[in-house]
Image: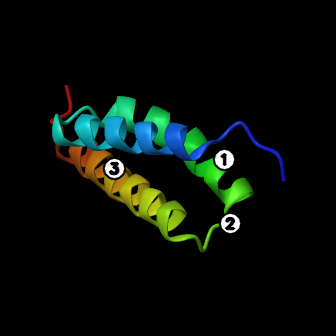
């Protein structure tokens, strides 16, 4: 299957994602990871180790964002 994803691009995206996660920039990380995950699912399949790692990171981001929204005081 042809794809725009290359090993170098995927590696770069992963490095940026980890940097954004470590800096607490969850919205930006999620914005980058969702299309990367979709692409990885097409190219490598959802069971691929790297694809699964991205899915896990997205799940953690969603949980963090959901808990942050629940903890925010209502105005």
Q: Which residue is drawn at 40% across and 59% down?
A: 59
Q: Is the residue marked by circle 2 packed among few (<14), some (14-19), or many (20+) residues within 10 Å?
A: some
User: Tag 3, which secondary structure?
Assistant: helix
Residue 74 as seen in the image, left or right of residue 35? left
Q: Residue at x 19, y 25 (%)?
A: 75
Residue depth check, mark 1 versus mark 3: number of the one nearer the observer: 1
Query: Which one is earlier in the sequence, the residue at label 3 or at label 2?
Result: 2
Q: Position of residue 14 (x, y in %)?
A: 40, 44
Q: Where is residue 30 in the image (x, y as percent from the top left)?
A: 42, 39
* Disc assigned to residue 61: 3
* Disc assigned to residue 39: 1
Instruction: Using the image, determine if residue 10 lies above or below residue 23.
Output: below
User: Tag 1, which secondary structure?
Assistant: helix
* Disc assigned to residue 45: 2
* Disc assigned to residue 2: none
Residue depth check, mark 3 versus mark 2: number of the one nearer the observer: 2
């Amino acid at each position: 299957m042809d794809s725009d994803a290359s090993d170098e691009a995927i590696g770069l995206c992963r490095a940026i994602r980890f940097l954004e996660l470590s800096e607490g920039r969850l919205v930006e990380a999620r914005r980058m990871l969702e299309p990367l995950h979709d692409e990885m699912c097409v190219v490598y399949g959802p069971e691929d180790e790297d694809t699964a790692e991205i899915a896990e990171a997205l799940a953690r981001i969603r949980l963090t964002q959901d808990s942050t929204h629940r903890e925010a005081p209502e105005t």
